[in-house]
Amino acid sequence: MNDMSRIPASEITPESVYLRRRELIGAGLASPLLALAGCSEAKEPAAVNRPKDSPDGFRTADTLTHFEDASSYNNFYEFGTGKNDPAKNAHRLRTLPWVVSVEGEAEITGAYHLDKLLKGMAVQDRIYRLRCVEGWSMVIPWQGVPLAEIIKRFKPTSKAKYVAFYSKADREQMPGMAYESIPWPYREGLRIDEAMNPLTLLATGMYGKPMPNQNGAPLRLVVPWKYGFKSIKSIVRIVFTDKMPQTSWNMLQPEEYGFYSNVNPAVDHPRWSQASERRIAGTDSKLFGQRIATLPFNGYAKQVAHLYKGMDLRKWF
Amino acid sequence: MDWRWFGLKTTAHALALLPAVLLINNALNDRLGADPVAALTHQTGEWALRLLLLSLAMTPLRMVLKQAWPIRFRRLLGLYVFFYASLHFAVYLFLDLGSGYWSQIGADILKRPFITVGFTAWLLLLPLALTSNRWMMRLLKKNWQRLHRLVYAIAILAVLHYWWLVKSDIREPLLYAAILALLLGFRLFSHLKVRRAAV
């Protein structure tokens, strides 16, 4: 039997697997059928060993997403609704000069060049999980300044209960705007205490590089405990207000996207489950990567759960 | 053996298989971008839908061209619809959910309307694929055609499945819906014309 020697080692079933073959076949056949019969409970999947975050939540030890993935798979509808469209089209965005207008219920307001807005502020490093409402997630190292520090400079009044944000909307630079996929300009908002939370970052860079245009250059929000669409990109306007601001996705589909949009595995999107996510991280192929359980507040409950004490999170989704 | 037909059929098989070959090759060589599972799900689904519409175009094509050859590709196309729809379902089952989350399927199918209609469409394809051979055709006689009219329901469900899953950009599902409306409208129109002529 000389032929045996020609079988590569990789094709030989390991003994441990071979011995469990009936179990494996049984599991493969039984599980989906049981599930189809509707008689199975939503079981907690095999416990994934999740690395720890730093106590302040500023740095997670989760495996980082590869820069190439984080900068080529984006939702930035002003540059097109395809995931690769922003990376293809965002080079048309002119980020210099960049003026941010600060308005509303604050002692100081006005239009500021970005460098003046950020003057004297030390850029900080954060490593956050980013959970998209579509069911995938990344782990991204950001550079930026805490939003709280910027807000303090403008001395918001007691009437400033919310902060509204608006993205740049320029049809000439943003070819995706030709199609009204969403009400332009893209707008988002936070309650003032959410905006003041130390986790909330105004990011100017990622992976130690200036922010790529497709990721929201030159200034974007990062709110790691909320679904990704809350982290508005390419901000040109910040408004302090006493009313809950309108937000783009909520305007489009109010029953699907709430104002808060905190990551919550217990509250499904009406059309899909939010209980688990596909993690896009590391440099290995993601083809056979296992789903992981989604955590309440995206794993930042310790830092932010107190903001929502006494609120029914099913109602205020 | 008619060699011309053999050549044409072989070409059709090769063309229908080409997207799957390219997809699998790209998947194994990590060329499907950051989220290859999403890319595979999306593209296998789109090819199932495209081939489904193409198979539905064969009858109108025969009537317009007044030639019989388009009908000879109908079964081949239909079987590839089943092939891509099954790939689509398998990617969702084995790569997206993975065995750790199979317990979720029952809830998904019952609670998520877009998955409900998608799964129903795939289920309805099963009897069509199983009865696509000549032997079953002869066995079922008139009922065979009745059974295979299910394809209209399947096509409507498939377009709905796509429409209901997009977040805001409905342009692509709208295009498929328009093509389907055209193909079904053509049948309705010619059916009424035949009936009126008979009166």
Image (cartoon, helix red, strand yellow):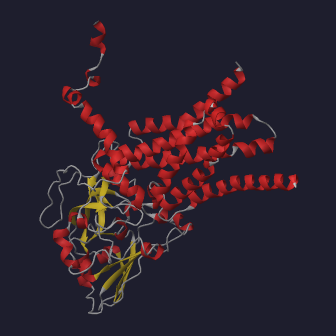
Q: Residue at x 25, y 72 (%)?
A: A200
Residue that lies at the very extreme toward the top in this rendered image: A1
Query: Would residue A104 appear left or right of B59 to someone viewing this image?
Result: left
Query: Would residue A200 appear left or right of B183 to someone viewing this image?
Result: left
Give how far across and how far down residue A24 sits, in percent. 27, 35
Tag count: 0
Q: Residue at x 66, y 38 (%)?
A: B74
Residue closer to the observer: A112 or B89: B89
Check the picture and name the quadrant holding the N terminus of chain B.
Answer: top right
Q: Is residue A305 above or below residue B118?
A: below
Give how far across and how far down residue A248 sits, in percent. 44, 74
Question: Can residue A279 be seen?
Answer: no
Q: Quadrant of residue B47?
A: top right
Q: Residue at x 31, y 51 (%)?
A: B103
Q: Residue at x 69, y 52 (%)?
A: B183
Q: Quadrant of residue B145?
A: top right
